[in-house]
Amino acid sequence: MKIVAADVIVSSPDRNFVTLKITTEDGITGLGDGTLNGRELSVASYLRDHVVPLLIGRDAHNIEDAWQFLYRSAYWRRGPVTMAAIAAVDVALWDIKAKAAGMPLYQLLGGASRTGIMAYGHASGRDLPELFDSIRAHLEQGYRSIRVQTSVPGINAVYGVAAQPAADGKRYDYEPAQRIPLPAEEDWDTRAYLRHLPGVFEAVRAEFGPELPLLHDGHHRMTPIQAAKLGKALEPYDLFWLEDCTPAENQEALRLVRHHTTTPLAIGEIFNTVWDYQTLIREQLIDYVRSAVTHTGGITAMRKLLDFAAQYQIKSGIHGPTDISPVGMAAALHLDLAIHNFGIQEYMRHGPLTNEVFRQSFTFVDGYLHPGEQPGIGVELDEEAAARFPYQPAYLPFNRLKDGTVHDW
């Protein structure tokens, strides 16, 4: 089943997305997500200029061979641009193979290991009443696990707080990439954050009780000792996980955190390959793998990574923000349903324009996601609708400390 065409489609309905559409000689098409927030055109160019010419004439069924070829033949391996491009090809080929088989993709991955996929939503507020209202609203939407993010007194803008004003005048709404000429500058104070956050979780537990799974994202802002301090301070509130407590490129730093707290740790949304996890998994320094299918080489690579993690009783927590397109989200759901060591799935609802461009079969009912029974990954691209929303430059913000030092955002 030879590949006869591969098209890169860049569209910006509610935000920018990069989609790869592969077509075989039999007329079967497959979709892959190559979106890289704030650097979308770099992946689009990598695909158009370097990858697409290598795909024409290849057998679409040979997915493993295609993955290894794209990874090894470039010589310059890894990195978010390369791995997002490989992921786009990989997911599109799995979509084609499942459509040719007449099955939803999860069946080709071994079938379902569960009936539904537990998802968590993102509640936030500038103060406790607003935060409580957001938690209640997410519970009413069906979420049964909640990530809690909050403003910090003395800090003007904090990642993950939807109601705070953005530099482009729009609501943050969990899509912090803003359509402005230069990245927005935000401020940060780790000591103020560490003082404020435990009291927030104390109040949330008092209001919503001990049963509700609560999560929190530190977004790489802490040093290892600061992360250890926070993890220990949050132990009384029984978090499902503390995410990205410290920049994890330094994998050994998690040893210090692990030695000081029993709060479960989730890491990896900015990782791209299994090599980023070697120490973390082998030494059991984390509890959840946070990589996205889109940024980690696709289903082929993620399945191997999660099988490695399973040997150490580490579970999945696949990245699922709105800068993962519905194509990437659907791919994650098929993997979630099939693997044994599933933990939880991040789920942020896409906007109405995105849903117009990407027609989806996956469902969210009573707190659980399901990819559906449509052959393939279950997403179709409306190219006419996509063409109505051309690319718009957008940048993620960055942080500075009070003295002007650039800090991890």
Image: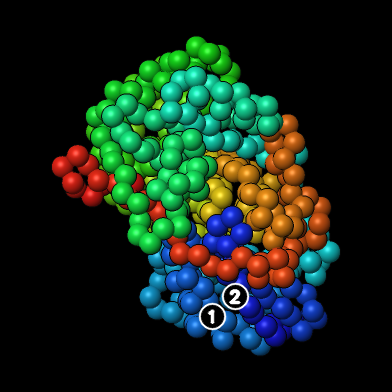
- In contact (CB < 8 Å): disc 1 and disc 2: yes
Q: Check the image and report above or below for 161 versus 269.
A: above
In the image, farthest residue toward the right: 102
Is residue 176 visible to us here?
A: yes
**Between residues 172 and 168, which one lies in front from this camera angle?**
168
Say what amino acid the circle numbered 2 marks. Answer: Val
Separation (CA) of disc 1 from disc 2: 6 Å
Q: Where is residue 376 shown, x and y percent of the image? A: 75, 62
Name the image quarter holding the N terminus. Answer: bottom right
N-term-proximal mark, 1 vs 2: 2
- Please tell me which residue is depicted at 81% across the width and 52% down the height of the picture: 373
Q: Is residue 215 visible?
A: no
> Identity of the amino acid at label 1?
Arg
* Few, some or many residues within 10 Å of mark 2 (<14, 14–19, 20+): many
Residue drawn at 46 percent across, 57 percent down: 179
> What is the secondary structure assignment of the residue under circle 2?
strand
In the image, residue 323 sits, relative to residue 380, either above or below, namely above
Q: Secondary structure at mark 1?
A: helix
Residue extending furthest toward the left: 403
Where 39 falls versus 158 (above or below)?
A: below
Q: Tell me where residue 104 appears, x and y as whole percent.
A: 78, 57
Residue topped by disc 2: 8
49 vs 266, nearest the viewer: 49
Can you identify the residue that label 1 sits on?
48
Tell me what residue is drawn at x 35 percent, y 59 percent.
Answer: 182
Q: Residues within 10 Å of mark 1 (few under 14, many from 20)?
A: some
Q: Is residue 174 left or right of residue 271?
A: right
